[in-house]
Image (tube, rainbow, N blue to C red):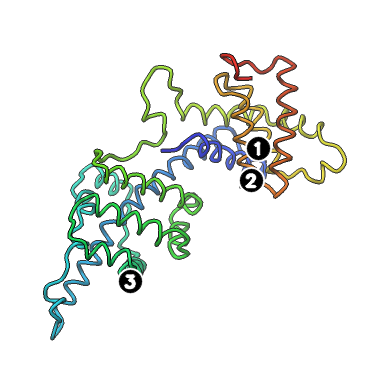
Amino acid sequence: MLNRRILRIKAFKVLYSNVLSGNMSLSQAEVMLDQACEATRDLYIYMLGIVSPLTRIARERIEAAKGKFNPTEEERNPNMKFADNALARLLDEDADFQKVFAKKKYSWLPYDLLLKKIMTSVASKDYYAAYMASEERSLAEDCKLFIRIFEEEFVDSVELEQILEEKSLYWNSDLAYALTWCCKTFKSLAKGENWSLLPLYNSELLKGDDVESDKYFVRKLLQASFAGYEKYSAMVAESVVGWEKERLFSTDVVLIVMGLAEVVTFPTIPVKVTINEYVELSKFFGTPKSRSFVNGLLDRLVQNLVNEGLVKKDGKGLL
């Protein structure tokens, strides 16, 4: 589930937090890193768990309409397509998923007001009307609908973000990524692939003795960045002069330190890949000028380490 870029971001946030506080031990940082990684998968599981509560809201509304003093023909004979959708049934009947959900003590029951608001919004949309009008009844059809719901109702939802932030410090910033993976899960189900919860690390999906563990990668990256922070940050300070010091943003330093630590620590990752990754991260965690600054300075410092013989790579073309 977590790719290398997301893992770099997780390590960056922990390292940056330590730079700001200045009182975190490596063991504390490793615990924080593990918690941050687990939190993303937990949010993915929690958001999958919203499928059945939304379906329940639809059923309750149908039953309430039937119980009116003088229900309409449509209310007496409602369209049950969404209320009986196969995706909710699949998740409800999956013992492993329900066990995980219950073990984490997750529930959407306290947020019925939000669920009803979401369902009202969904029912007003053209994509929902088209779904309900279609005679197709299949898991694929239901998955496609929930992809639309997740993409259009949950992204940029202030109320949802507030709820998630109250439940976990990590969840608010992870919502977009978790929703992406929920939609990927729905797409795989729509294609007829077997259902299973995604593992935490992408490397767990791969086979072979030469597959490096992503958990090992992010742990080692954090450890190397911690151990080398004083040395690498001093290299940064010595390499900037005059006007550059005014442009030196604290997040830029952390990103450059991590880039240097990664180049030295991982012999199978090409230097170019490492530099490109941290330049990309600078777009999100720095200033408008960070991209060119991190790119130029990181490239220069990496070359210094190469010239000093401190960068060893396994294979041609990795330098």
Label 1 – label 2 distance at C-alpha? 11 Å
Q: Which of label 3 and label 2 is nearer to you?
A: 3
Quarter of the rendering containing residue 209? top left
At a point 37% along the width and 19% down the height, the residue shown is 208
In the rendered view, does 36 fall on the left or right side of 286?
Answer: left
Residue 187, how many percent across, how many down? 32, 46
Q: Residues within 10 Å of mark 2 (few under 14, many from 20)?
A: some
Q: Which of label 1 and label 2 is nearer to you?
A: 2
**Up/down of 125 relative to 232, above or below:** below
Circle 3 residue? 124
Circles 1 and 3, Cβ within 8 Å, touching? The answer is no
Circles 3 and 2, Cβ within 8 Å, touching? The answer is no
Label 3 – label 2 distance at C-alpha? 37 Å
At a point 24% along the width and 61% down the height, the residue shown is 55
Disc assigned to residue 283: 2
* Label 1 vs 2, first from the N-terminus: 1
At a point 14% along the width and 82% down the height, the residue shown is 71
Circle 1 residue? 255
